[in-house]
Image: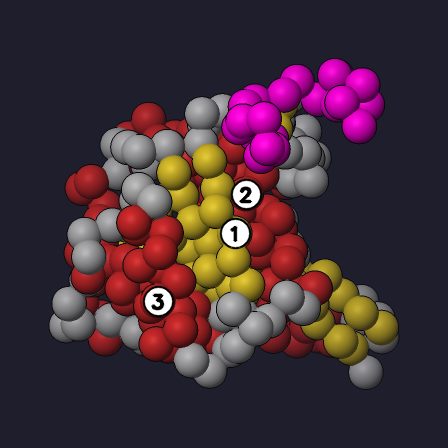
Amino acid sequence: MRGIVFAEKEVSYLAGTLAGKMTQSNVVGFVGGIAIPQVVRFATGYQNGAQCANPAARVFVNYTDSFTDPALGAQEAQKMLARNADVIFGAGGSTGTGAVLTATQSGAWGIGVDADQFVTTYMSGTVAGSDKLLTSAMKRLDNAAFNTISDVISGTFTSGTVVETLATGGVGLAPFHQTDPAVPQPVKDYLNTVKQGIIDKTIDVDQSCRSSIFLHSSTGNRWINLCDWPKII
């Protein structure tokens, strides 16, 4: 028997990289479902990718505790839009889909999850907002199955858990489809460079690239250098 899991942080880091490069407001959002490990990994990778690609970017992350409430996802997306988020990644079943639909139909960029949502949610471009869906952070079930069958045929099959990654083709970003003309070539080139860096392990998807944090306090909100953080505590 073989169990197959997917490197959510790798593909969501790429999605975050794209968000960080495409945002005009320097505010991007993540609407998740229940905060199970897989969803948290999507959020972490997205946040780190956005911040490393764009040091000025602020990333709002919210877990809705639901995978089945598109109206709730839409509500959370509206809150982020009101805070000037102009790219929203939804990773939470139909709840996340509600967030992505709301973002794109409100004029912001959207990023889908798991499958190519341009094909599924937007019915290959026939649903409103398809021209604002940047991409989807896909789990490539087809490639994972193909890789497993190939291992059987070649006699290299092993039991246990296998992690499908960018290197194996088990995860990856969906095509830009209708938004392709809006994504500048330097951004596409940068994405390819980051992807190769993740594969080569010269880029750590667990690295936030943050040298400071935004501190909320009764004395006022301000950026604090992390080197000074122990002194503040």
Residue 72 higher or lower than 62, as above or below: below
Q: Nearer the viewer, residue 44 or 25?
A: 25
Q: Secondary structure at mark 3?
A: helix
The reply to whether residue 174 is visible in this rendering is no
Residue at 59 percent across and 33 percent down: it is 218
**Residue 165: image location, x then y, percent:** 64, 54
| Residue topped by disc 2 | 47
> In the rendered structure, which disc, 1 or 3, sits on the residue that comes first in sequence?
1
Residue at 61 percent across and 48 percent down: it is 44
Label 2 Cα neighbours within 10 Å, binned few <14 / some 14-19 / many ≥20:
many
- Seen as rendered, the residue at the extreme front is 218
* Label at residue 61: 1
Do tag 1 and tag 2 residues touch (Cβ < 8 Å)? yes
Q: CA distance from mark 1 to mark 3?
A: 14 Å
Q: CA distance from mark 3 to mark 2?
A: 21 Å
Location of the N terminus (image quadrant): bottom right
- Seen as rendered, the residue at the extreme right is 159
**Residue 5: image location, x then y, percent:** 69, 68
**Residue 69: image location, x then y, percent:** 42, 80
* Label at residue 75: 3
Label 1 Cα neighbours within 10 Å, binned few <14 / some 14-19 / many ≥20:
some
> What type is the residue that disc 2 sits on?
Gln
Can you tell which quarter of the image residue 233 is in? Answer: top right
> In the rendered structure, which disc, 3 or 2, sits on the residue that comes first in sequence?
2
Colour mode of the rendering: secondary structure
Q: Nearer the viewer, residue 127 or 174?
A: 127
Residue at 51 percent across and 78 percent down: it is 67
Question: Which numbered mark, 1 or 2, is in the foreground of this view?
Answer: 1
Q: Nearer the viewer, residue 20 or 212?
A: 212
